[in-house]
Image: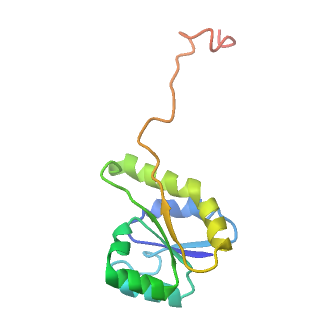
């Protein structure tokens, strides 16, 4: 499947996405389509052989004109809502991690789909996903450290 990565999506997501063998990912920057209106973007992406668009702009589905253009393009719409809690470097990391983690499953689902689909990705929570230990102070946990 060929997926066009929309302008608001960080370009840093491309390299890990390209690890999905048999699929292609291009960013609008690569095609010099930055700033292109969504209606034209959907039309052009569909005519250039893309099957899906990956975007942070989920408001596209709230616009009559953009929704109709998306439907006509036959593109699958893969969206993730960034929200206010996902700003700066931590927000970008959450977006990239969320997209990279789920994309193999999305590609499988879309590959089996008959017809056009809308996919809503979930943003990883902002909670810490790690623990830090002092092995000197926790001999029971790290008995071979000493």
Query: Residue at position x 50%, y 53% from top?
Result: 98
Q: Which of 62 and 19 is in front in this view?
A: 62
Q: Nearer the viewer, residue 109 or 3?
A: 109
User: Where's residue 62, x and y in %?
Assistant: 33, 73
Query: Residue at position x 49%, y 84% from top?
Result: 45
Q: Is residue 47 left or right of residue 24?
A: left
Quarter-of-image position of residue 70: bottom left
**In the orientation shown, which residue stands out farthest toward the left?**
84
Question: In this view of the protein, can residue 137 be seen by the observer?
Answer: yes
Q: Nearer the viewer, residue 53 or 30?
A: 53
Relative to 116, does residue 137 appear above or below in the rendering? above
**In the orientation shown, which residue stands out farthest toward the bottom?**
47
Q: In this view, does 95 lie to the left or right of 49?
A: left
Query: Residue at position x 66%, y 66% from top?
Result: 108
Q: How many marks?
A: 0
Quarter-of-image position of residue 2: bottom right
User: Where's residue 5, x and y in %?
Assistant: 48, 71
Q: Which of 133 and 76 is in front in this view?
A: 76
User: Where's residue 27, x and y in %?
Assistant: 47, 72
């Amino acid at each position: 499947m060929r997926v066009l990565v929309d302008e608001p999506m960080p370009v840093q997501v491309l390299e890990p996405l390209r690890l999905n063998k048999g699929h292609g990912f291009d960013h609008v920057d690569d095609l010099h389509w930055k700033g292109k209106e969504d209606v034209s973007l959907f039309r052009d992406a569909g005519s250039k052989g893309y099957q899906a668009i990956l975007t942070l702009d989920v408001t596209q589905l709230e616009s009559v004109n953009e929704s109709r253009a998306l439907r006509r393009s036959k593109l699958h719409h893969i969206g993730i809502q960034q929200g206010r809690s996902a700003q700066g470097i931590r927000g970008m990391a959450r977006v990239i991690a969320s997209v990279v983690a789920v994309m193999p499953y999305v590609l499988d689902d879309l590959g089996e789909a008959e017809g056009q689909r809308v996919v809503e990705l979930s943003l990883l929570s902002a909670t810490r996903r790690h623990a830090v230990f002092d092995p000197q102070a926790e001999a029971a946990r790290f008995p071979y450290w000493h």
